[in-house]
Amino acid sequence: MYTKFYGLTKKPFSLIPDPSFLFLSQKHKKALTTLQYGLVSQAGFTVITGEIGSGKTTLVRSLLKKIEVQCEVGLITNTHSAFGSLLTWVLAAFNIESTASNKADQYNAFVKFITQKSNAGIRVVLIVDEAQNMDIQTLEELRLLSNINTEQQIMLQLILVGQPELVDKLNQPELIQFSQRISIEYHLTPLNYEETEQYINFRLKVAGSTENIFLPSACAALFYYSSGVPRLINNLADLALVFAFAADKKEINWKVIVDVVRERTIGGIKRFEGKICLIPNIAEIEKLRLALLEETGVDISKSR
């Protein structure tokens, strides 16, 4: 709707994980390097965690595009027990055809697949996204799958990607053998203000923009309300473009961001409680000014 108005070729803040929009902040670069190192070093278990919307899935998608030809990759995204047993997920992830209905036969089918790939010099990599949804029993079953490996040869590599609750589960006494097998781990934290501004401008550039549509005051407000979480930045920035387009504004300042947050708050979203006033007044605006100045160094009283 607004892309032509702003000279864009596509939406810059879509919520769909798209590797072409991957912004490699220092922390995201470390996370991606950690994933790649886990593959190169043939680590048995690699664990990547981060808050909701921090960019973990986009990193995984990027990794899948860069992965070596010598790897056979399976990706599991539906990790809730309601979607079936672990072995059913695993066989489906690698497109292994099997009529087996019991776990023993399913396991044998997977071992046969692994062995064939290993004999051909191909490493098998299983990536489990949203792994925090797995229960203790399923995680233990996943560990047992790694018994396929030997001291001399890693035939199956596992990469677990999930929210911080995954770490809590892995630290439980029942999974001590699992946690001891984790070779590499990394926790992805939200963006800081400088990275948030770079992230916004980067995505606009990828979408075809030649201008910095979001003024520094808008970037500061986006950081303040999103706490640097990429998915929430995308959500607010996309709505800001809609609001500004409706008002025929070519540039977006902090006031547009506040309008977006206020509308979402009125609509029932509770995330911004304590950070937004439904009826803005001088005192509330001054409170926002001081908060932005403290967190970002941007003084909105001197900005448009």
Image (cartoon, helix red, strand yellow):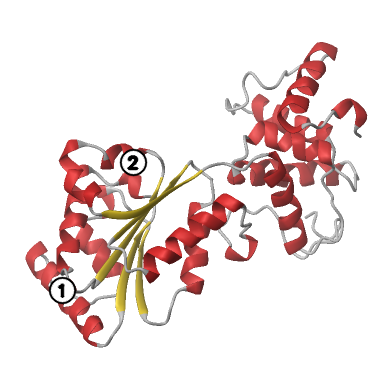
Residue 92 horizontal/vertical position (percent): 28, 68
**How far, Cα to Cα, is label 1 from label 2?**
28 Å
Quarter of the view holding residue 108? bottom left
Element at label 1: helix
Q: Nearer the viewer, mark 1 or mark 2?
A: 2
| Left or right placement of residue 251 versus residue 49 in this view | right
Residue appearing at x 79%, y 64% in the figure = 208
Mark number for residue 280? none
Mark 1 Cα shell of 10 Å, populated few (<14), some (14-19), many (≥20):
some
In front of the other: 299 or 250? 299
- The answer to whether 67 appears left or right of 178 in the picture is right
- Amino acid marked by disc 2: Val
Determine if residue 102 is in view: no
Placement of the C terminus among the 4 image quadrants: top right
Q: Which residue is mark 2?
A: 167
Q: Which is nearer the eye, 279 or 55? A: 55
Q: Position of residue 99 (x, y in %)?
A: 15, 74
Q: Which residue is mark 1?
A: 111
Q: Position of residue 60 (x, y in %)?
A: 47, 61
Tell me where residue 171 sits by quadrant: top left
Give 289 or 265, whichever is nearer the viewer: 289
Q: Is residue 178 above or below residue 101?
A: above
Q: Is residue 158 left or right of residue 213?
A: left
Residue at (80% x, 23% y) in the render: 289
Query: Upstream in the sequence, badge 1 or badge 2?
Result: 1
Front residue of this view, candidates 81 and 190: 190
**Which amino acid is tagged 1?**
Val
Horizontal and vertical percent position of residue 282:
85, 13
